[in-house]
Amino acid sequence: MPKPSENLAKALEVLHKLQEAGHVAIYTGDIPGRQVRERLVKNGFIKEVTKGWYIPSRPDESTGDSTSWYTSYWEFCSRYLNHKYGDDWCLSPDMSLQLNTGNWSVPTQLIVRSPKASNSLTRLPYYSSMFNLKSELPQKQLLTVNRAIRLYTLEASLIYCPVNLFTQNPIDTRTALAMIRNASELLPFLLEKGHTVYAGRLAGAFRNIGKDKIADEILDAMRETGYDARETDPFNQKLAIQFSGERSPFVIRVRLMWQQMREQIIKVFPVAPGIPADKEAYLKDIQVIYVTDAYHSLSIERYKVSPQLIERVRRGQWDKDSNEEDKKHRDAMAARGYFLAFQQVSESIGKILKGENPGTVADDDHSRWHLQLFGPSVNAGLLRASDLAGYRNLQVYIGGSKHIPPNVDNMRDVMPLLFELLEQEPEASVRAVLGHFIFVFIHPYGDGNGRMGRFLMNAMLASGGYPWTVIPVEQREVYMKALETASVEQQIEPFAQFIAHLVKKGMEGKPEAVLITT
């Protein structure tokens, strides 16, 4: 009789072949035999999504960890829907608009249209679901495929999305509008069906974002062909923003987020004290808070560090060459790297206090922060030197988050914009909050994005004379939830209020982070 380990090994060989074939969504029929499937489920290598369908998972994945589901979501939906409906399906116009504009966040409910559907609800993990709407599909020229997901085209999703999307999701809809280069991309569809209501709505929407020429061309073309299109603005407010022909959805999205969110931050933040007269004292205060900051920041990232380890690093008592434990200890590498990066950030703050543009300093220096953060891990052989060669070269995912960072090409497009916005922003509070948020939203590195985001936040706080602010590990859940709300729902208020509260406490000399002493 085969040993249990041999049986599991054979089951894993089956799973390996499925993964090599590119299967993220695994159907019961893909697995040869009930016992093989049960072994994989029992040992945590796959988990059920809905009846008869599974996704790969990690055996050490804790109960309630949504990471494997969120990272598999779109590939699962694609194969599941192709299996169920063949080519006879597509997402709804509003869902299509979201994906066409680069927003691949996992939705609470995915709306799918198909003539083969039965108006049924499919419940999915972590309170997500799929509603299968019985509906005829639009003409083929109105459809496209992106990452194996069948969608309305960008133009068709703008025309046919519900009017309330313009007020409920203004960033996605404004991004879609800004991606349209001229009226000729929309007019064939508007004129063919005589869509006067849609034409009037789009004309008002384009005028709202400053694209008057497209708005006028739509109205003129409709009137010249006998249609009475009356302009209406579907948005409930207007943003003072100019677009300069960008086509990248992430560049447009970040510009819009910055403009829409900045006033909300200014409203809740204390007035900036201004660059301190005693710059040396300010820099000394930063060094005093180092141990506390390192403890909390590394603990937020789930590194098991102790104040004693941090202090050993600070005093130079950490020895990777003669102490074998230090040489191999991942947490020691993280602590040493944090110390070196902290010193590099302090040098950058010194430049800012002398009057250099904070956005320019961050642009010039942030790569050095990252190199210092992971240099000890490279020296100890835990990372390859190539891992520190600039921004990431692969798609990344954030554990437990519905937000999916931009792909490599979009990330490289949008990073220069972040520093351009930091350079141009007059308010230190906005630089600090949006600098941190948008940095982790983009997630430009394979690792260290949270620590880098907090370094960037504090460098920008220094540009307004605000104190170095520690995010307490005890408030990790509140902090992460606020970032998630900003990323997925484009609502910055919870994160802005969270940071503003900590800054106010620091200004009053009552920081919420527990002071760590050794």
Image: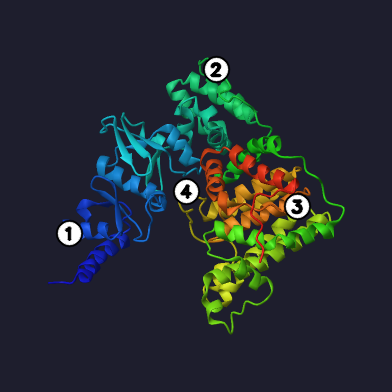
Q: Nearer the viewer, mark 4 or mark 2?
A: 4
Q: Earlier in the sequence, mark 1 or mark 2?
A: 1
Task: Tell me whether the residue at label 3 lies in contact with that at label 4, contact meaning CB atoms closer than 8 angstroms.
Answer: no
Q: Which residue is mark 1?
A: 35
Query: Which part of the image, by quadrant, shows the N terminus?
Result: bottom left
| Quadrant of the image occupied by residue 459 | bottom right
Q: Earlier in the sequence, mark 4 or mark 2?
A: 2
Q: Earlier in the sequence, mark 3 or mark 4?
A: 4
Amino acid type shown at disc 4: Ser
In three-dimensional space, the C-alpha distance between marks 3 and 4, rounded to whole angstroms, equals 30 Å
The residue shown at (32%, 37%) is 89
- The extreme left residue here reads 1
Q: Which residue is mark 2?
A: 223
The residue shown at (63%, 65%) is 338
In three-dimensional space, the C-alpha distance between marks 2 and 3, rounded to whole angstroms, equals 56 Å
Q: Earlier in the sequence, mark 2 or mark 3?
A: 2
Q: Nearer the viewer, mark 1 or mark 2?
A: 1
In three-dimensional space, the C-alpha distance between marks 1 and 3, rounded to whole angstroms, equals 61 Å
- The extreme right residue here reads 277
x, y (%) of residue 439?
61, 51
Q: Is residue 24 depicted above or below 109 in this figure?
A: below
Query: Disc 1 on helix, strand or loop?
Result: helix
Task: Tell me whether the residue at label 1 lies in contact with that at label 2, contact meaning CB atoms closer than 8 angstroms.
Answer: no
Residue 462 numbered tag: 3
Task: Tell me whether the residue at label 4 lies in contact with that at label 2, contact meaning CB atoms closer than 8 angstroms.
Answer: no
67 vs 375, left or right, is left
Task: Tell me whether the residue at label 1 lies in contact with that at label 4, contact meaning CB atoms closer than 8 angstroms.
Answer: no
Residue 401 numbered tag: 4
Amino acid type shown at disc 3: Ala
